[in-house]
Image (spheres, helix red, strand yellow):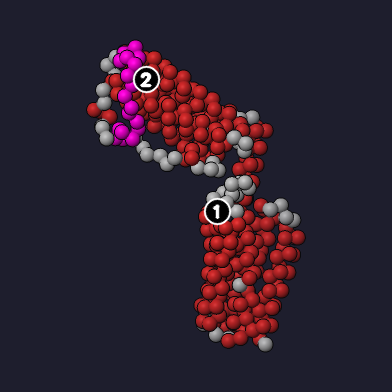
Amino acid sequence: MKRFSELTEQEILALAITNEEEDSRIYRGFAEGLRGQYDASAKVFDEMAEEEVRHRTMLFDLYRSKFGEYLPLIRRQDVRGFVRHKPLWLVRPLGIDEVRKYAAEMEYETARFYRKAAETARDASVRELLVQLAEAEDKHEAMAEKLEDKISPSARSAEDETARRMFVLQYVQPGLAGLMDGSVSTLAPLFAAAFATHHTWDAFLVGMAASIGAGISMGFAEALSDDGSLTGRGAPWLRGAVCGVMTAIGGLGHTLPYLIPDFWIATTVSIIVVAVELTAISWIRWRFMDTPFLSATFQVMVGGALVFIAGILIGSS
């Protein structure tokens, strides 16, 4: 890698040309990744890509007039000091907020590069163009940070709804499925063991085994059920992790009270935790799944109560 201070004026212009080419392709990648779900934002990134092409043309015309047709290949990674960004434009599906932040950071870095290059340029025409491009990149940075200002309210509302739907598909649904399974399915073995032995430590071990086992099972089941390519539900490993972790949390919540040595105190605390868990599940279903709160509460409470009673009856028999 070369230091920026070691670059010649020819190499600085060549690097600027390469940067504009790469930035244009990145914005095209953003546009393609957002198209269909965030059409208004995709259009803005198409416009930004076209602007980068114009910048590249301006730079190359100046380069050709100064140094001829040969253009050395110099890239960001060849020069010390450039920030290394992860290839976000290759990720699918793209998150609109992450894309905006990424684009703003990229434009800020490019503007700084042009200003630094302008300070070292000896040729007046080169210096003038670099300052002009720095100002243009500043505008792009502001555009990326306030991308919603360029989008009509109706389009912005549609994009927000799409983002909400993607959040529900990728995080809320698998998390809710896991929390419901962990909270309800572990009730029977936990309370059966508790009332069969009246030993809190034995009940704790059974609850731990049921919770962790259910978490592993649900995680793999969710990850293997759908690769997300058609449904847009995101990476299967991420959904599986969310589902598995929430399943384990759902079971551990009412298992941990059995670390209390006194059986009846532990059981009372565990029952209170179960009520809190079922209320939380009802609220999530109401908040994100458009299920009426009373209906969601009735369904969850009845199901949980039946499993709870089954565990007690089996353990007491």
Neighbor class of circle 1 (other Cα within 10 Å; few <14, some 14-19, many 20+) is: many
Viewer-closest of 13 and 139:
13
Q: What span is colored magenta in the figure?
A: 64-81
Estimate the x, y position of residue 252 in percent, counting from the top left: 55, 70
Image quadrant assignment for residue 64: top left
Estimate the x, y position of residue 293 in percent, counting from the top left: 72, 58
Q: Residue placed at 57% from the left, 32% from the top?
A: 42
- Identity of the amino acid at label 2? Leu
Q: Residue placed at 69% from the left, 55% from the top?
A: 286
Question: Of helix, strand and loop, which mostly describes the magenta segment?
Answer: loop
Viewer-closest of 152 and 313:
313
| Magenta highlight on residue 180 | no
Tag 2 residue: 130
Mark 2: secondary structure? helix
Estimate the x, y position of residue 57 in percent, counting from the top left: 43, 18
User: Up-down: is 50 above or below 299?
Assistant: above
Of the 4 image quadrants, the one containing the C terminus is bottom right
Q: Kindly indicate whether the residue at mark 2 contacts the one at mark 1 (C-beta within 8 angstroms).
A: no
Tag 1 residue: 236
Taking 12 as reference, is 275 left or right? right
Estimate the x, y position of residue 16 in percent, counting from the top left: 37, 24
Q: Residue placed at 36% from the left, 28% from the top?
A: 112
Neighbor class of circle 2 (other Cα within 10 Å; few <14, some 14-19, many 20+) is: many
- Identity of the amino acid at label 1? Pro
Is residue 273 visible from the viewing direction of this image?
yes
User: Up-down: is 41 above or below 54?
Assistant: below
